[in-house]
Every structure is written in structure tokens, then in C-alpha cells.
Image: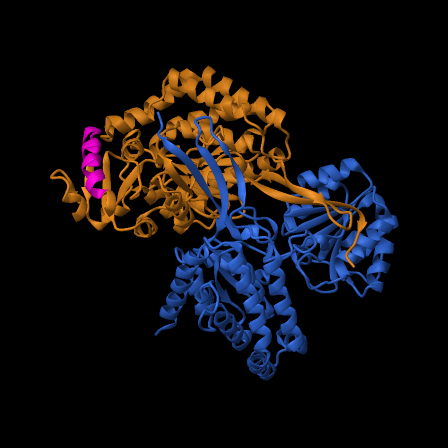
Chain colours: A blue, B orange
Amino acid sequence: MSEAEEFLKVARAARDAATVLAPMPRAPKDAALRAVADALEAATDEIVAANAADVDRARENGTSEAMIDRLRLDAGRIATIAAAVRQVADLPDPVGEVVRGGTLPNGLELRQVRVPLGVIGIIYEGRPNVTVDAAALCLKSGNGVLLRGSSSAYSSNTALVRVMQQALAATEVPADAVQLVPGRTRESVKHLMRARGLVDVLIPRGGASLINSVVEESTVPVIETGVGNCHVYVDADADVDTALKILVNAKAQRPSVCNAAETLLVHSAIADEFVPKALTALKDAGVTVHGDERVRAYGADVVAATEEDFTTEYLSLDIAAAVVDSLDDAVAHIRTYGSAHTDAIVTRSQQAARRFVATVDSAAVAVNASTRFTDGGEFGFGAEIGISTQKLHARGPMGLPELTSTKWIYTGEGHIRG
Amino acid sequence: MSEAEEFLKVARAARDAATVLAPMPRAPKDAALRAVADALEAATDEIVAANAADVDRARENGTSEAMIDRLRLDAGRIATIAAAVRQVADLPDPVGEVVRGGTLPNGLELRQVRVPLGVIGIIYEGRPNVTVDAAALCLKSGNGVLLRGSSSAYSSNTALVRVMQQALAATEVPADAVQLVPGRTRESVKHLMRARGLVDVLIPRGGASLINSVVEESTVPVIETGVGNCHVYVDADADVDTALKILVNAKAQRPSVCNAAETLLVHSAIADEFVPKALTALKDAGVTVHGDERVRAYGADVVAATEEDFTTEYLSLDIAAAVVDSLDDAVAHIRTYGSAHTDAIVTRSQQAARRFVATVDSAAVAVNASTRFTDGGEFGFGAEIGISTQKLHARGPMGLPELTSTKWIYTGEGHIRG
């Protein structure tokens, strides 16, 4: 069987399974998730052995130890993955929720009810825990899932999916609802991107180049996630200590994530006081500052920023910095260079906060708070499949309800239109 | 200037205008809509003259009188169009609505608020009233709009957009927020479909071939609308009189619209009683029945149905018909041949209704009611931009809230993550 035929086989199997899964109530889905969690722990040795093959191959290929650490699974990590699945089982089921409803003037009873999307394709890099996390969230929300992880984790992902399918086979949830996209070539991703009609939505999780290539090539609708060029704007009216605390937290508390800050903008009226203190605080936190000319005037350590610095998601202890002459200039900068993920203002001015919130067109806007709070866990969602930076369907952290569509149901007693 | 350059000019102008329009509260938007309504009535002569050019050209091209009637504008129709704009002004503004919100355990105040999508592209056929309707709905929801109507209505649409822009120029809403896509060639549609980054969403309104070509070719996210291959399923437990009433209404009350029924499915247990009566009732309503072999056994007038009949959106006084052996077979037929718009069951059985509702995967499911109720007006939306048959973002009739996205806003007092 060719890779294309193999893909069609698993995609159709996922679609058929999703049809069975969609109307299923919460109890059997939760029971299936708990069975998956138990099975993953019971299969620890098998999973670790499969993972070892990926780790060995990565090492042969000269992969950095940091990347190998992301790839590695051990008993402790598998227990953590299983615990996360049990947490998803504990979350409320979004399916069946009545979103709107009422009785129309003619007596028709109308309800808009959450239903699963159908089959969700997830394309992701790095950590094999995503394989299980994403499968659990899709199953809980009644969806079939086609998983396409990094080829570097193919053995691990194959083992994880096999264990999940075996566990599901003993439950009411069809085992075929969880599928690994066969093959580790670039071509296998393309099958997924062109499976319009079989796959209802694709969610790419990873860096900008992965996401852009999926957006460009996919005929399946895509939800863009996770590229975060987040800004901290320090307004003329900012409390300096608050601004320093937020800046350092947003940049340095966990620089590798999408809600970390990548650019600092400072109002010129406060620059003399704030920028020198900011440069010291950032230096103490190990951060390299890439500044425009006006920022460089305040410190010898500041690297000259190019235009590219302002568009870059560093994901490292680097930050771009510029001085702006007004709040509106800051907003214009964010619109030009940002990724519409999360942008923060630090200010004591109610008017400035109001204008910034109204005019920054991003998934999240933070006022006197670190950008790091844009997160499904922090927002109380209990779980997160990614952070959407697009405007259609879902925007910002996506929890279980964002993995559903809706259906209108109306009930009459022979109602006809006049 | 080339057509491509002209397109970029108007698209950028719409984008800049949308930035100004997005944070605008309700009052100035409503005032602008009322000014547009007044201006359209005041410019009746100018609009009718422009329309006459389209009508003359259509007649030269041998267009049918029915199509010419759809194209024609007169003082009465312009008054109706203006009244519809005033109705949109009377509707609540979705922008600013707090969808979810609360205070997080750490004291952060979190709100999810409706915001405009940005710039919406509308591609449509036929009636020039859509030009004004769509513009009014987009403006009310804070969006810029790029209108691409039928080339046969180009003179009419040019006049309508000119009058709207002139009216807006005297209001707080930027006149550039409403734009006609320049040019009447197929190429001009392509500019719109490839304007990712300038246009946030495309809504094609029209027949299946228009919608499919937009879905295939567009890099801008698309909301599919309006193709309706709607089914009426008459269950074993149906009340026959109720079923006849619903069938005739769904098929014949207004056959040219997307929520009209195109296929009748009858449970074999009730076929002997129901099908002969249905054939008579449909014949009396002037409907031609295209039946499978089992339906043809009941009537000499029944045309033999091909597989294509079951996929066809007739939009005429024709209906496909088949006998099925179970509710599940009916659902399978609907999944195979339907367009996931609206499907109805007629039954007295609570269990059958429940199963049909749970397993039919369509935007709307009707129980003992005509499919014709799937409509923004009937649902109480006050206005409708189209009926989405896709699962992402919006499903079923789309009113003003469906023309918005959301933004998360969180406010703290120096909150940082630990």
C-alpha cells in the first residue's frame, strides 16, 4: 500500500470512528480516558524502549542535548502524561451544552447545541507528550484525531498511539478515533493538509515556519496557533517598579514559550527614568537587549537592533527595544511588527489603558500584568490545545469548547412557513 | 494603474478605515447607517439610471426576464433597501459584548469581549440589494467591507457604493470602510481571494460552483454559505397529515432558496400509506418527483432518479425521493448526499427524534417542522449575512455576532507569574 493509500485508510477509519464518538455522552468518554491513562502507565517499559530508539537516532544525528531532553520519556514523565489524561477526564464535557435557545413567537423550540467538530488533525513538533495530550482533548470533546508529530519522535509516537488504541479497544470509544499519520516524510504531512472532506480542521503547533507552511498549503481549514511576538509597552504614566517587575517576568520567567515578551516599547516621556533601570534589570536577568538608537543612548551593552529584530520571536534571553513618542506610536509599532498574540501596557492612566485595549488588535491585551498569563491553565480552562492567533472560530487560549462546533435544533408540531 | 494595483489601493483603504471603525461605539455607526439610508432614497434617480444600463446590457446578452427582474431596481425597491439599512441600525451592536469573564484566583480581572473581524470580503451573485445589505451588516459590526458582486450588476453596484461612500463622508464612519472591488473580470475576484493579511474573511454567497471555487482558490479564510440539499425524512411513526404538510411547505413554498427541501426519504414501514398521498400532494403543488425504484412503484409520473438527483440542489419544483428501511439508513443517506444545511424528521416517536437529532451532522436539524425555518429572520437575529454550512467559526444562519471575533483583556496591578 502506498503512503497515500495508507493515509486514506487511517483517515477514513478516524472519520467512521468519529461518527460513533460524536453523539456519545460524557461517562463512556471519561471511562475510556481513564483506561488510556492506566494503559500508558502499565506500558511504561514498552514506551521507554521505543523512545530510546528515537533518542539514539537523535544523538547519532548530532541533536543538541537540550532537544534530546525534550524528546526523552522516562517513568516519571509517563506518569505525568497519564495524570494529565485523568485531569482531562475530570473536566466538564463541552458537547451538548446549550449555547443559546428559546421558544420562537410561533412556538418552535430552538436550541443551539455544542457538537464535536468531527476529525481534527494536529501537526506538531518536539515533545511526545503532545501526542497523548492532544488525543485526550480531542476524545473528550467527541472528535477523532489524526496525529502528525515530529519525525524525530516517530517511534515514541507509534508506541504511544498503539497503547492508546489498545486501551480504547476495551472501551465504548472506538479505537480508530485516535490515529497516527503514517510515514515520517514531508509528503505524509501533505496528505493531511489536502484531506478536505475527511478532516474538519488542522491545528499546527510549533514554530512560525511550520505554521506558515500549513496555512499556505492546506485545503483543510486551519487554526493558526502559537507564534508570539509579544510586546510590553511602558506608558508615560507607568509606575516604574511595576513596569520593571512585569518586563523581567514577561521576558525571562520562561523565555522559550509563545507568551514571553519579545519587544519592549517605552514612551519617550519616561525613557530617561525607565530605560537605564530596565537595562540593568534585564542584564541581571541575563537578557541581551537589541535596541534602536534611542535605547542605545542609555547603555553601552545594547546591541543595535535591525528591523528584523522587531519581527523576531526570539524564544531566548533576547529582547528588542525601542523608544516611542506616544501610545498611538506604540500601537502602530505593535500592529506593524507584532503577531497579534499578547501585548501588555503598564500605566497608571485609566485613559491610556482604555485606548490601548481598544486599539491593539491582538488575541489578548494585558493591563499592568505580565504577558505570561495568556494561557488556558491560567484562564481556568483546565487544559489547552494551543493559543489561536487568528480571528475566525477561536482566538487566544483554546480549551475544550474551542474543539466544538454547534448545531441548531428546532422542534415543532407540524410547523410550516406562511 | 493595473487592476491588481487598483485592488491593493482599495483593500488598503478599507483596512485603514476598519482600524478607525473597529473601536467605534454604537451611536456614530447607527447615525452613519441612517445617513446611508437617507442618501440611497435621495439618489433614487441616479441609482435607477445606473441600473438601467445593467438591465439593457443583460437584455442584449439574452438574459431571461426572470433574471432581469432580479437585477432591476426601481423607487420601491430602493425604499425597501433603505428600510433594511434602518432596521440594521435598530439592531443591538455585537461589538463590546462581554462573552465570558470573571476574576481569576490571583485577582486578575479577565474578560472576553467581542471585536470586529477587520475587513470582510463578500462575493455574491444576482440582486444588487445584497450590495447594501452586506455593507450595512459589516459597518454595524465594525468591519470594513470589500464587495464583489455579479459583473452583470456592476453599474448598479458602482452607483450604490458611490452613494454610500458619499453619505459616510459626512459621518464619523470613514467612507473608505465600504469598497467595491474594481473590475468586472474573473481576475478581479482572484485579487480578493489572495489578499491574505489585508482581508480577514471571505464570505461567498451564491451557488455551489461559486462557493467551491472560492474555497479551493482562496488563501483568505472562507466561510462557506448557502448550498442547501435539505432532506425531509418521514419516519415509520410519522403522522401522515403532518408529514404531507411539512413536505409540501419545505419543497414548494419558496423553491428557489437554500432551505427548501430537495430530497424526500420515507421509511419503508409507512411507504404504502404515505408515498401515494405524497405523490398526489406534490403533483398538486406542481412538483416533479425523481424517485428511486421503490418510489416509482407507487406512481407512473415519477421520473427515474439517478445518483446525481440525490446530490442536486434543484432550487426548482423538483424533488428527489427514496424509500429507506430504517432511520439509520436515512441518516446514512443524508451524510452521503446532503450538504449539511438543514434536515428534517417527521415522527411521533421521541426516541426516533432524539436519534435523528444526535446523528445527523448538519447545521440545523428540524423535528416536525419545515426546513424553511433555518433563517436568521425566523431565528430572531433581525438580519442575516448568509447561512454557514461549515463547522468552524459559525454554523447555520449568521447574524451580526457571527461577523465578530473576540479579544481577551486582563487587568492586574503588577501581576507576574511565579
Residue closest to the eye, B185 or B27? B27
Query: In the rendered image of this protein, does residue A150 appear above or below residue B201?
Result: below
Examine the rendering and report whether any part of residue B287 can be seen. Answer: no
Query: In the rendered image of this protein, does residue A244 appear above or below residue B189?
Result: below
Verify whether residue B279 appears in magenta: yes
Residue closest to the eye, A123 or A320? A123
**Percent position (x, y) of residue A415?**
37, 30
Residue closest to the eye, A96 or A248? A96
**Percent position (x, y) of residue A165?**
48, 70
- From the viewer's perspective, is A289 left or right of B367? right
Q: Quadrant of residue A194?
A: bottom left
At 49% from the left and 28% from the top, the residue drawn is B382
At 61% from the left and 81% from the top, the residue drawn is A62
**Percent position (x, y) of residue A195?**
41, 59
Verify whether residue A271 appears in magenta: no
Examine the rendering and report whether any part of residue B124 can be seen. Answer: yes
- From the viewer's perspective, is A220 left or right of A332? left
Q: Quadrant of the C terminus of chain B?
A: bottom right
Magenta-drawn stretch, dominant element (helix, strand or loop)? helix
Number of callouts: 0
- From the viewer's perspective, is B261 left or right of A224? left
**Percent position (x, y) of residue B27?**
62, 24
Magenta stretch, residue numbers = B271-287
At 22% from the left and 38% from the top, the residue drawn is B274
Query: In the rendered image of this protein, does residue B190 appear above or below residue B52?
Result: below
